[in-house]
Image (spheres, grey):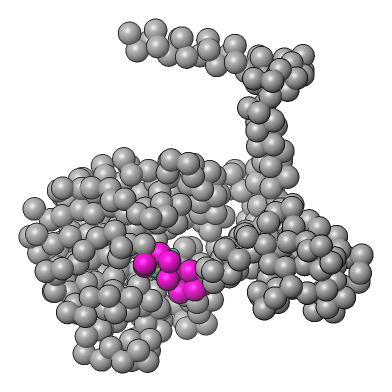
Amino acid sequence: MIGDRINLRSRWLALRNRLLANPRFQRWAVDFPLTRPLAQRRARALFDVTAGFVYSQILFACVQLGLLPFLAAGPRTRDELARHLGLDAAGTLRLLKAASTLGLVEPLPDGGYGLGAQGAALLGNPGIAAMVEHHAMLYADLADPIALLRGEGGPTRLGTYWSYAASAEPAGLEAGAVADYSRLMSASQSLVAGDILDAISLQGRHCLLDVGGGEGRFAASVAARWPHLRVQLFDLPAVAARAQERFEREGLGERAQAFGGNMLVDALPRGADLISLVRVVHDHDDESVRHLLAAVHAALPPGGTLLLAEPLAGTPGAEPMGEAYFGFYLLAMGSGRPRTPAELVVMLEQAGFVRVRQRRTRRPLLTGLITAEVG
Ligand SMILES: C[S@@+](CC[C@H](N)C(=O)[O-])C[C@H]1O[C@@H](n2cnc3c(N)ncnc32)[C@H](O)[C@@H]1O
Protein backbone atom coordinates (compact mmCIF):
# COMPACT_ATOMS: atom_id res chain seq x y z
CA MET A 1 0.00 0.00 0.00
CA ILE A 2 2.65 2.51 1.14
CA GLY A 3 4.89 1.35 -1.74
CA ASP A 4 2.01 2.01 -4.22
CA ARG A 5 1.51 5.49 -2.79
CA ILE A 6 5.24 6.28 -3.05
CA ASN A 7 5.27 5.04 -6.66
CA LEU A 8 2.24 7.11 -7.54
CA ARG A 9 3.79 10.20 -5.94
CA SER A 10 7.13 9.80 -7.75
CA ARG A 11 5.33 9.32 -11.09
CA TRP A 12 3.27 12.47 -10.43
CA LEU A 13 6.40 14.45 -9.45
CA ALA A 14 8.22 13.28 -12.60
CA LEU A 15 5.29 14.32 -14.80
CA ARG A 16 4.82 17.68 -13.07
CA ASN A 17 8.53 18.51 -13.20
CA ARG A 18 8.81 17.55 -16.90
CA LEU A 19 5.96 19.93 -17.62
CA LEU A 20 7.30 22.78 -15.45
CA ALA A 21 10.75 22.52 -17.04
CA ASN A 22 9.35 22.52 -20.57
CA PRO A 23 9.69 25.97 -22.22
CA ARG A 24 6.59 25.31 -24.42
CA PHE A 25 4.51 24.50 -21.34
CA GLN A 26 5.91 27.57 -19.52
CA ARG A 27 4.86 29.78 -22.46
CA TRP A 28 1.43 28.18 -22.58
CA ALA A 29 0.94 28.54 -18.82
CA VAL A 30 1.60 32.29 -18.86
CA ASP A 31 -0.57 32.81 -21.94
CA PHE A 32 -3.56 30.80 -20.73
CA PRO A 33 -5.74 33.08 -18.56
CA LEU A 34 -6.59 30.42 -15.95
CA THR A 35 -2.99 29.35 -15.28
CA ARG A 36 -1.45 32.82 -15.78
CA PRO A 37 -1.64 34.05 -12.14
CA LEU A 38 -0.10 30.82 -10.81
CA ALA A 39 2.60 30.77 -13.51
CA GLN A 40 3.47 34.39 -12.76
CA ARG A 41 3.59 33.71 -9.01
CA ARG A 42 5.91 30.75 -9.58
CA ALA A 43 8.18 32.77 -11.88
CA ARG A 44 8.34 35.57 -9.32
CA ALA A 45 9.10 33.10 -6.51
CA LEU A 46 11.91 31.56 -8.55
CA PHE A 47 13.31 34.99 -9.35
CA ASP A 48 13.16 35.99 -5.67
CA VAL A 49 15.15 32.90 -4.67
CA THR A 50 17.66 33.67 -7.39
CA ALA A 51 18.00 37.33 -6.44
CA GLY A 52 17.37 37.22 -2.67
CA PHE A 53 20.99 37.96 -1.78
CA VAL A 54 20.79 41.24 -3.70
CA TYR A 55 17.64 42.29 -1.85
CA SER A 56 19.38 41.50 1.44
CA GLN A 57 22.34 43.67 0.53
CA ILE A 58 20.06 46.57 -0.43
CA LEU A 59 18.43 46.26 2.99
CA PHE A 60 21.88 46.10 4.56
CA ALA A 61 22.89 49.35 2.81
CA CYS A 62 19.68 51.06 4.02
CA VAL A 63 20.30 49.95 7.62
CA GLN A 64 24.02 50.77 7.64
CA LEU A 65 23.39 54.23 6.22
CA GLY A 66 20.59 54.96 8.71
CA LEU A 67 18.09 55.62 5.90
CA LEU A 68 14.99 54.30 7.65
CA PRO A 69 15.23 56.18 10.98
CA PHE A 70 15.99 59.33 8.94
CA LEU A 71 12.73 58.89 7.00
CA ALA A 72 10.79 57.99 10.15
CA ALA A 73 10.92 61.66 11.10
CA GLY A 74 9.06 62.55 7.87
CA PRO A 75 9.54 62.62 4.08
CA ARG A 76 12.78 64.06 2.69
CA THR A 77 13.91 65.55 -0.58
CA ARG A 78 16.49 63.67 -2.62
CA ASP A 79 19.11 66.31 -1.80
CA GLU A 80 18.52 65.89 1.93
CA LEU A 81 18.73 62.15 1.51
CA ALA A 82 21.97 62.32 -0.49
CA ARG A 83 23.56 64.46 2.23
CA HIS A 84 22.41 62.12 4.98
CA LEU A 85 23.49 58.97 3.14
CA GLY A 86 26.84 60.39 2.01
CA LEU A 87 26.17 59.24 -1.56
CA ASP A 88 26.16 61.22 -4.80
CA ALA A 89 22.84 61.95 -6.53
CA ALA A 90 23.07 58.88 -8.79
CA GLY A 91 23.92 56.48 -5.95
CA THR A 92 21.16 57.95 -3.80
CA LEU A 93 18.55 57.54 -6.51
CA ARG A 94 19.68 53.99 -7.31
CA LEU A 95 19.35 52.97 -3.67
CA LEU A 96 16.01 54.73 -3.19
CA LYS A 97 14.48 53.18 -6.31
CA ALA A 98 15.67 49.71 -5.30
CA ALA A 99 14.51 50.15 -1.70
CA SER A 100 11.10 51.34 -2.87
CA THR A 101 10.50 48.11 -4.84
CA LEU A 102 11.15 46.26 -1.58
CA GLY A 103 8.64 48.43 0.32
CA LEU A 104 11.36 49.94 2.50
CA VAL A 105 10.82 53.50 1.26
CA GLU A 106 8.05 55.13 -0.73
CA PRO A 107 8.42 57.59 -3.61
CA LEU A 108 6.32 60.74 -3.30
CA PRO A 109 4.78 62.80 -6.11
CA ASP A 110 7.17 65.72 -5.48
CA GLY A 111 10.22 63.52 -6.13
CA GLY A 112 11.04 63.04 -2.44
CA TYR A 113 10.81 59.85 -0.45
CA GLY A 114 8.98 58.72 2.70
CA LEU A 115 9.20 55.61 4.82
CA GLY A 116 7.68 52.51 3.18
CA ALA A 117 5.39 49.97 4.85
CA GLN A 118 8.15 47.39 5.29
CA GLY A 119 10.53 50.10 6.48
CA ALA A 120 8.01 51.13 9.14
CA ALA A 121 7.49 47.49 10.19
CA LEU A 122 11.25 47.05 10.45
CA LEU A 123 11.62 50.11 12.65
CA GLY A 124 8.80 48.77 14.85
CA ASN A 125 11.07 45.89 15.86
CA PRO A 126 14.46 47.32 16.81
CA GLY A 127 15.94 43.81 16.81
CA ILE A 128 15.65 43.54 13.03
CA ALA A 129 18.15 46.30 12.21
CA ALA A 130 20.67 44.72 14.60
CA MET A 131 20.06 41.31 12.96
CA VAL A 132 20.55 42.80 9.50
CA GLU A 133 23.83 44.42 10.52
CA HIS A 134 25.25 41.24 12.02
CA HIS A 135 24.27 39.39 8.81
CA ALA A 136 27.42 40.86 7.26
CA MET A 137 29.22 37.97 8.99
CA LEU A 138 26.80 35.33 7.74
CA TYR A 139 27.00 36.77 4.24
CA ALA A 140 30.79 36.35 4.29
CA ASP A 141 30.53 32.84 5.76
CA LEU A 142 28.09 31.80 3.03
CA ALA A 143 30.32 32.99 0.18
CA ASP A 144 31.18 29.32 -0.50
CA PRO A 145 28.18 27.36 0.77
CA ILE A 146 29.52 24.08 -0.58
CA ALA A 147 32.75 24.35 1.40
CA LEU A 148 30.61 25.12 4.44
CA LEU A 149 28.47 22.04 3.84
CA ARG A 150 31.57 19.92 3.45
CA GLY A 151 33.01 21.35 6.65
CA GLU A 152 36.00 22.60 4.67
CA GLY A 153 35.45 26.33 5.02
CA GLY A 154 37.73 26.79 8.04
CA PRO A 155 36.82 29.04 10.97
CA THR A 156 33.73 31.15 10.38
CA ARG A 157 32.93 34.67 11.48
CA LEU A 158 29.71 33.58 13.14
CA GLY A 159 31.65 30.86 14.98
CA THR A 160 33.83 33.57 16.51
CA TYR A 161 30.88 35.87 17.21
CA TRP A 162 28.88 33.15 19.05
CA SER A 163 31.91 32.41 21.17
CA TYR A 164 30.30 29.55 23.14
CA ALA A 165 29.45 27.57 20.00
CA ALA A 166 32.97 26.30 19.42
CA SER A 167 34.43 26.79 22.89
CA ALA A 168 35.64 23.78 24.88
CA GLU A 169 35.41 25.91 28.04
CA PRO A 170 32.45 28.28 27.52
CA ALA A 171 32.18 29.03 31.24
CA GLY A 172 35.64 30.61 31.02
CA LEU A 173 34.65 33.13 28.33
CA GLU A 174 35.47 36.70 29.27
CA ALA A 175 33.15 39.70 29.24
CA GLY A 176 34.44 40.94 25.86
CA ALA A 177 33.72 37.61 24.17
CA VAL A 178 30.01 37.58 25.09
CA ALA A 179 29.10 41.27 24.91
CA ASP A 180 28.18 41.55 21.21
CA TYR A 181 25.92 38.50 20.98
CA SER A 182 24.33 39.28 24.34
CA ARG A 183 23.41 42.78 23.14
CA LEU A 184 22.01 41.40 19.87
CA MET A 185 19.86 38.87 21.72
CA SER A 186 18.62 41.50 24.08
CA ALA A 187 17.70 43.84 21.21
CA SER A 188 15.62 41.14 19.54
CA GLN A 189 13.98 39.84 22.71
CA SER A 190 11.06 42.20 23.35
CA LEU A 191 8.64 40.85 20.71
CA VAL A 192 9.66 37.30 21.57
CA ALA A 193 8.92 37.79 25.26
CA GLY A 194 5.60 39.50 24.51
CA ASP A 195 4.46 36.68 22.25
CA ILE A 196 5.44 33.96 24.75
CA LEU A 197 3.78 35.72 27.66
CA ASP A 198 0.59 36.32 25.67
CA ALA A 199 0.41 32.60 24.84
CA ILE A 200 0.45 31.21 28.39
CA SER A 201 -0.62 32.10 31.90
CA LEU A 202 1.89 31.96 34.75
CA GLN A 203 -0.85 32.29 37.37
CA GLY A 204 -0.21 29.99 40.32
CA ARG A 205 3.54 29.68 39.61
CA HIS A 206 6.15 30.77 42.14
CA CYS A 207 9.53 31.00 40.47
CA LEU A 208 10.81 30.99 36.89
CA LEU A 209 14.37 29.94 36.01
CA ASP A 210 15.40 31.16 32.55
CA VAL A 211 18.22 28.89 31.39
CA GLY A 212 20.49 30.43 28.75
CA GLY A 213 18.64 33.61 29.63
CA GLY A 214 21.21 36.04 28.20
CA GLU A 215 21.18 39.57 29.62
CA GLY A 216 17.90 38.90 31.42
CA ARG A 217 15.48 40.69 29.17
CA PHE A 218 13.02 37.77 29.08
CA ALA A 219 13.26 37.21 32.84
CA ALA A 220 12.70 40.94 33.45
CA SER A 221 9.64 40.90 31.15
CA VAL A 222 8.24 37.95 33.08
CA ALA A 223 8.82 39.80 36.35
CA ALA A 224 7.06 42.88 34.98
CA ARG A 225 4.06 40.92 33.67
CA TRP A 226 3.67 38.67 36.74
CA PRO A 227 4.60 40.71 39.83
CA HIS A 228 4.05 37.75 42.19
CA LEU A 229 6.83 35.68 40.53
CA ARG A 230 10.46 35.40 41.52
CA VAL A 231 12.82 35.08 38.57
CA GLN A 232 16.18 33.37 38.29
CA LEU A 233 18.53 33.18 35.35
CA PHE A 234 21.31 30.78 34.47
CA ASP A 235 23.89 31.57 31.80
CA LEU A 236 27.64 31.58 31.31
CA PRO A 237 29.28 33.58 34.16
CA ALA A 238 30.17 36.57 31.96
CA VAL A 239 26.59 36.74 30.62
CA ALA A 240 24.98 36.15 34.01
CA ALA A 241 26.94 39.16 35.31
CA ARG A 242 25.30 41.30 32.61
CA ALA A 243 21.88 39.96 33.63
CA GLN A 244 22.50 40.70 37.31
CA GLU A 245 23.38 44.29 36.36
CA ARG A 246 20.09 44.57 34.46
CA PHE A 247 18.10 43.18 37.40
CA GLU A 248 19.70 45.75 39.67
CA ARG A 249 19.22 48.56 37.15
CA GLU A 250 15.54 47.64 36.85
CA GLY A 251 15.10 47.58 40.60
CA LEU A 252 14.13 43.93 40.77
CA GLY A 253 16.16 43.51 43.96
CA GLU A 254 15.38 40.33 45.88
CA ARG A 255 12.95 39.12 43.23
CA ALA A 256 15.62 38.37 40.62
CA GLN A 257 18.90 36.50 40.76
CA ALA A 258 21.40 35.48 38.08
CA PHE A 259 23.61 32.37 38.35
CA GLY A 260 26.72 31.72 36.26
CA GLY A 261 27.81 28.31 35.05
CA ASN A 262 27.84 25.84 32.20
CA MET A 263 24.38 24.37 31.67
CA LEU A 264 25.90 21.38 29.85
CA VAL A 265 28.07 20.45 32.83
CA ASP A 266 26.84 22.06 36.04
CA ALA A 267 23.66 21.23 37.94
CA LEU A 268 20.95 23.86 37.46
CA PRO A 269 19.76 25.84 40.48
CA ARG A 270 16.80 24.22 42.28
CA GLY A 271 13.63 25.86 43.54
CA ALA A 272 11.91 27.03 40.35
CA ASP A 273 8.59 25.45 39.34
CA LEU A 274 8.94 26.83 35.83
CA ILE A 275 12.01 26.67 33.59
CA SER A 276 12.32 28.40 30.24
CA LEU A 277 14.67 27.72 27.35
CA VAL A 278 14.21 30.63 24.97
CA ARG A 279 16.15 30.42 21.68
CA VAL A 280 18.59 28.05 23.37
CA VAL A 281 17.87 24.50 22.20
CA HIS A 282 18.37 25.11 18.46
CA ASP A 283 21.93 26.31 19.21
CA HIS A 284 23.03 22.85 20.31
CA ASP A 285 23.62 19.45 18.78
CA ASP A 286 21.38 16.55 19.73
CA GLU A 287 23.66 15.09 22.38
CA SER A 288 23.91 18.40 24.25
CA VAL A 289 20.16 18.96 23.95
CA ARG A 290 19.46 15.52 25.45
CA HIS A 291 21.77 16.36 28.33
CA LEU A 292 20.19 19.79 28.82
CA LEU A 293 16.60 18.51 28.78
CA ALA A 294 17.52 15.84 31.32
CA ALA A 295 19.13 18.52 33.52
CA VAL A 296 16.01 20.70 33.27
CA HIS A 297 13.79 17.72 34.10
CA ALA A 298 15.93 16.95 37.15
CA ALA A 299 15.78 20.57 38.34
CA LEU A 300 11.97 20.81 38.25
CA PRO A 301 9.65 19.47 40.96
CA PRO A 302 6.71 17.18 40.10
CA GLY A 303 4.12 19.36 38.36
CA GLY A 304 6.87 21.74 37.18
CA THR A 305 6.74 23.04 33.63
CA LEU A 306 9.29 23.66 30.92
CA LEU A 307 8.66 26.40 28.34
CA LEU A 308 10.68 25.79 25.22
CA ALA A 309 10.45 28.72 22.82
CA GLU A 310 12.29 29.25 19.56
CA PRO A 311 11.60 29.48 15.82
CA LEU A 312 10.54 25.97 14.82
CA ALA A 313 11.39 24.12 11.63
CA GLY A 314 8.40 23.27 9.43
CA THR A 315 6.33 26.25 10.64
CA PRO A 316 3.42 26.37 8.17
CA GLY A 317 3.77 29.33 5.83
CA ALA A 318 7.33 30.03 7.05
CA GLU A 319 9.13 26.85 6.00
CA PRO A 320 12.28 28.55 4.62
CA MET A 321 12.82 30.32 7.98
CA GLY A 322 13.52 26.96 9.63
CA GLU A 323 15.54 24.63 7.48
CA ALA A 324 16.87 27.25 5.04
CA TYR A 325 17.66 30.31 7.20
CA PHE A 326 18.39 28.67 10.56
CA GLY A 327 19.73 25.53 8.93
CA PHE A 328 22.51 27.50 7.25
CA TYR A 329 22.86 30.09 10.01
CA LEU A 330 23.57 27.39 12.59
CA LEU A 331 25.84 25.57 10.17
CA ALA A 332 27.92 28.74 9.87
CA MET A 333 27.81 29.22 13.62
CA GLY A 334 29.17 25.71 14.04
CA SER A 335 26.61 24.05 16.27
CA GLY A 336 22.92 23.18 16.54
CA ARG A 337 20.13 22.67 14.06
CA PRO A 338 16.54 23.78 13.61
CA ARG A 339 14.03 21.19 14.87
CA THR A 340 10.39 20.54 14.09
CA PRO A 341 7.82 20.36 16.91
CA ALA A 342 7.56 16.61 16.30
CA GLU A 343 11.33 16.16 16.81
CA LEU A 344 11.26 18.23 20.00
CA VAL A 345 8.26 16.30 21.34
CA VAL A 346 10.21 13.04 20.94
CA MET A 347 13.29 14.49 22.66
CA LEU A 348 11.20 15.93 25.50
CA GLU A 349 9.39 12.65 26.07
CA GLN A 350 12.69 10.78 26.01
CA ALA A 351 13.92 13.15 28.74
CA GLY A 352 10.92 12.08 30.86
CA PHE A 353 8.54 15.00 30.27
CA VAL A 354 4.80 14.39 30.00
CA ARG A 355 1.89 16.39 28.59
CA VAL A 356 4.11 17.87 25.89
CA ARG A 357 2.05 20.41 23.95
CA GLN A 358 2.70 22.90 21.21
CA ARG A 359 1.08 26.26 21.99
CA ARG A 360 -0.24 28.76 19.52
CA THR A 361 1.78 32.00 19.39
CA ARG A 362 0.95 35.26 17.66
CA ARG A 363 3.98 35.25 15.33
CA PRO A 364 5.10 31.63 14.84
CA LEU A 365 7.74 32.89 12.39
CA LEU A 366 9.45 34.58 15.33
CA THR A 367 8.63 32.24 18.18
CA GLY A 368 7.20 28.74 18.42
CA LEU A 369 6.29 27.50 21.89
CA ILE A 370 6.16 24.03 23.42
CA THR A 371 5.30 23.31 27.04
CA ALA A 372 6.12 20.08 28.83
CA GLU A 373 5.50 18.94 32.39
CA VAL A 374 7.23 16.83 34.96
CA GLY A 375 4.80 14.04 35.97
C1 LIG B 1 20.88 32.47 21.40
S1 LIG B 1 21.19 33.03 23.02
C2 LIG B 1 19.57 33.25 23.68
C3 LIG B 1 19.53 34.20 24.82
C4 LIG B 1 18.14 34.47 25.41
N1 LIG B 1 17.51 33.27 25.89
C5 LIG B 1 17.26 35.13 24.38
O1 LIG B 1 16.36 34.52 23.81
O2 LIG B 1 17.49 36.34 24.15
C6 LIG B 1 21.77 31.58 23.83
C7 LIG B 1 22.22 31.82 25.26
O3 LIG B 1 22.68 30.57 25.80
C8 LIG B 1 23.84 30.82 26.54
N2 LIG B 1 24.66 29.58 26.58
C9 LIG B 1 25.22 28.94 25.54
N3 LIG B 1 25.90 27.87 25.95
C10 LIG B 1 25.79 27.84 27.30
C11 LIG B 1 26.26 26.96 28.31
N4 LIG B 1 27.00 25.91 28.00
N5 LIG B 1 25.92 27.22 29.59
C12 LIG B 1 25.15 28.31 29.92
N6 LIG B 1 24.66 29.16 29.00
C13 LIG B 1 24.98 28.94 27.70
C14 LIG B 1 24.54 31.93 25.81
O4 LIG B 1 25.48 32.62 26.60
C15 LIG B 1 23.36 32.79 25.37
O5 LIG B 1 23.08 33.78 26.33
Outermost front residue: 109
The answer to whether 116 is drawn above or below residue 11 in the figure is: below
Residue 262, picture quadrant: bottom left
Q: Is residue 105 left or right of residue 343?
A: right
Residue 38 on image: x %, y %: 63, 27
Name which residue lies at 68% across and 70% down.
68
The answer to whether one can see residue 356 in this image is yes
Q: Please report the bounds of the magenta region as a residue range.
A: 184-194
Report the quarter where the N terminus lies. top left
Seen from the viewer's position, the closer of residues 324 and 293 is 324
The answer to whether 243 is drawn above or below residue 139 in the figure is: below
The answer to whether 364 is drawn above or below residue 90 in the figure is: above
Q: Is 181 covered by the magenta stretch?
A: no
Q: How many marks?
A: 0
Q: Is residue 262 left or right of residue 77?
A: left
Residue 93 on image: x %, y %: 86, 63
Q: Is residue 163 left or right of residue 235?
A: right
Name which residue lies at 69% across and 47% down.
52
Seen from the viewer's position, the closer of residues 213 and 61 is 61
What secondary structure do most residues of the magenta stretch adopt? helix
Seen from the viewer's position, the closer of residues 177 and 119 is 119
Seen from the viewer's position, the closer of residues 326 and 203 is 203
- The quadrant of the rendered image in which ligand 1 is seen is bottom left
Residue 37 on image: x %, y %: 66, 28
Name which residue lies at 37% across and 43% down.
340
The answer to whether one can see residue 295 in this image is no
Name which residue lies at 22% across and 72% down.
208
Residue 148 on image: x %, y %: 61, 48
